[in-house]
Amino acid sequence: MSLHTELQTAIKAILPDVSCVIGWSGGPDALRGAPLFMRSEDDVNNFSGGFFAVNNPALYLPEYKGSKVAVVAKGCDSRSIGQLLAEKLINREEIHIIGFPCQGVIDNAKVVAALAGKVEAGQVTAVEETDETIELSFPDQTISLKKTDVMADKCSRCLYPNALISDTFVGEKREPAITEDPYADLAAFEALPLEERQAFWEKEMSRCIRCYACRNACPLCVCRDHCAAESRNPEWVTQADGVREKLFFQIIHASHLAGRCTGCGECQRACPMGIPVLLLKRSLSRRTEELFAYRAGVDAEATPPLLTFTLEEPRIQEREW
Amino acid sequence: MATQKYIAFADIPAWLEELSAAQTVYAPRREGKAVVYRPWQKGEQPELVERPTESAKHIVFPRAEELFRFNYQQAPETGGSKKLSLAEPADPAPAVVFAALPCDTRGFLFFDPVYSGSGTNGKFQDIYYLKRRACTTLITRTCRAPLATCFCNWTGGGPANREGADVLSTDVEGGLFLEALTEKGEAVLKSAALSPATEAHISAAQSSRDKAARSMGDAPDLGRTPPALISLFENLDFWREQSAGCLSCGACTYLCPTCYCFNITDESNGISGVRLRSWDACMFALFTLEASGHNPRNGRAARLRNRVGHKFSYYPGLHEGRFSCCGCGRCIKSCPSSIDIRRIVQNALAATEASRG
C-alpha cells in the first residue's frame, strides 16, 4: 500500500471521532496544493499529501479549540504543534495527530526562478511526479525539474522529517536530511558588513505591500486580530508607505517569535512579494537555542525559555563578568 | 486613423529613455520571486516573460498618499490659541506604465465611477485619484497565453482587452506592434525610436490577439451570481466552508487591480503631521470596526463574504451589473492558502441552484 493510500486509510479511520481532519488537496494550479478540511469520506478522496503538501496545518488548530480535530502532520508541522502545546494554546487531548515521514515539499519560488526567462510557472497545465523529478507540462513544451533543485530550503536542512509527536504514524521513518548544524547557512549572511545587510533589507522590504500574509500564516503568531502593527490607539506603526515601517514590523514579528519560531517557513512562503523574512527569525532562533539550550517545538512538555523566569540560566554567565 | 507603430524588443530601452525625459516611466522588473513595476532605469530591459506579481494600481492609487500636511502654531494675536495651517501636496508627476496587463488597465474602469462621484452626480470627486489617473498613460501588452489562474474572459475582459488602455501593444515577430487608443496614447507613440507598422505587423498582431483569445477557454455564465450571493448572505455555514483555509491577510486585496478601499489616518509628530490615505482591506479585523467596538463583519467568513459579495453582487448592483473583478487571478495565484474566488462564485451558484431545485 502506498503512503498516500495508508494516509487516506488512517484519515478515514479517525473521521467518525473528530469534527474534521486537516490535511491537503490539490490547489488552483498543478504546482500548488491547498489546505483541506475533511469532514466526509468524499473529502478524503481529495486528499493529496506529498511534494505539494506545503501549508502548515498547525496554523488552524487554535481556532478548533473546544472540539476534537485530527491533523496530518509533516515533521515541521509537528514542531509547530509541539510549540502550540508547550505554550498551552491547544489541548493535547483535543488533537489527533497523524504523522508520516516527509520527503520534502516544493518551494514555488524556486520553480519560478528555475523557469525564469523561459516560461511562467503559472502557465503549467499538468505535473507528473516521479521519485526524483517533477515533469511540468506547458502549452508549448515540457520541462523536467529535479525535486532537490526546487525543494524548500527548510527541507534540505531538515532535522525532523518524521512527525515528532503523533497518535498514528503511517509509513517508514526517514533519516534526517542533515546531521550537522542547521544554521550553518546563516554564517555567510551574518559575516556581511552591517551596511550591506542594511542595504539588503531595505531593498527586499521595499517590495512589501503590507498585506501581513507573513504574520497571518504564522502558526505561532498569537495576537491574531490584536497586532501592534495595526493598533490605532496607541499607534505604534504609521501607515506611511516606507521601508522603515515595513522593516520595523518584521523586527517586531521576529522578536515576538524569538525562542518560539520552529522555522516552518510559512511566513516567507506566504509572502506574495518573495521577501526572505524567515532569515530574521532563524537568526534569532539560533541565538535563543544557543542561549537557552531550547529548540522550539521539539519537546511539547518543555517550558519555552522566554515564557518563564529562572534565577540562573545555565548558558548565561551572569556572575563572572 | 489611430497611429500604429512597431518597435523591436531590443529598442524598447531607447523608447523608454525618450519617454523618461518628461515623465516617470514604470516598467516590470524581476526582483527575486516577484515581478514589480519600478521606475525604469536607463538601459534596463523590462521583464517581459513573467507577468507582474502586483498590479499597476499603486501607480495611480498609492499605498499611502499624503492628502495634506498640517501644522499648529501658537498665535499671540488669537489670544494664545493654536493656529492651524494646512499645506496641499504638489500635483502628481506625469507617469507612463509600460507593459501593463490588459486586466490591470481594465481594473481602473471599476475605480473611475466610484472616485469620480458617479453616485453623487459628480458632487464628491476624489481629486487625488482623478489627478493621477489623468496624468498616467497606460501602455498595455496583449497577453500571450493564460496562467492557470487567469479568468479575465469570465468577467467581460480578454487577453487583448483595450478598455482603459492608452496604447495596446501586441507581440509580433521580434518586437511589439503598438496602436494608440487615446490622445495620451498618440503622444507616447510620437517617437523616433518607433518605426511605422507594416501590413505584416498588423496581420501578425491580429493573429496574436486571436490566438490569445482562443487560449482562454469557455467562460461560464455568471449572470445569476449577484442574486445568488445575496441569497447566501446569511448562510454563514456556506461562508465558513469557503473561508476555512483563509488567513484573513490582505494579499488578495492588495494585489487586486480593482480593490479600492482605503483608510485615513493623521500621522502627527507633535504639533505637525500629515493626513494619509492608505490602502485598507476588508480581510483585516480592523476594517469596519466601529467606535463601539462592534464589527459587523466579525470573523473570516464574514470578511471573505464581503470581498466576494462586493465584487460579484454589491458593486454590480450599483454599477450597471458590471462585476468589479477583472479576472487577473492574482488573488488566486498569490493566496498563501490557495483560496480560489472562481470556485467560491461557482459554489455559490451551485448552492443556490440546488436550493431552487
Image: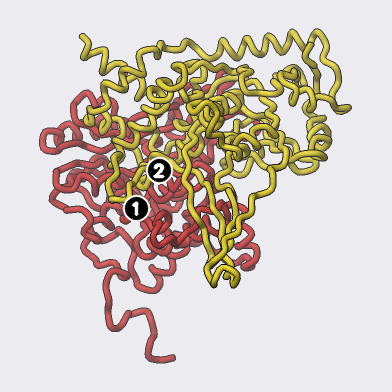
Chain colours: A red, B yellow
Q: Pointer 2 indicates a residue of which chain?
A: B
Q: Quadrant of the N terminus of chain A?
A: top left
The residue pinned by badge 1 equals A160
Q: Position of residue B17 (x, y in %)?
A: 81, 37
Task: Give the residue drawn at x 46%, y 37%.
Answer: B253
Task: Give the residue drawn at x 65%, y 66%.
Answer: A195
Amino acid at circle 1 = Tyr
Q: Position of residue A110 (x, y in %)?
A: 53, 40
Q: Residue furthest left?
A: A17
- C-alpha distance separating marks 1 and 2: 29 Å
Amino acid at circle 2 = Cys
Instruction: State the residue in front, A305 or B274.
Output: B274
Q: Position of residue A22 (x, y in %)?
A: 25, 38
The residue pinned by badge 2 equals B249
- In the image, taking residue B41 as reference, residue A109 lies left or right, namely left
Label 1: state its secondary structure.
loop
Q: Pointer 1 indicates a residue of which chain?
A: A
Instruction: State the residue in front, B7 or B109.
Output: B109
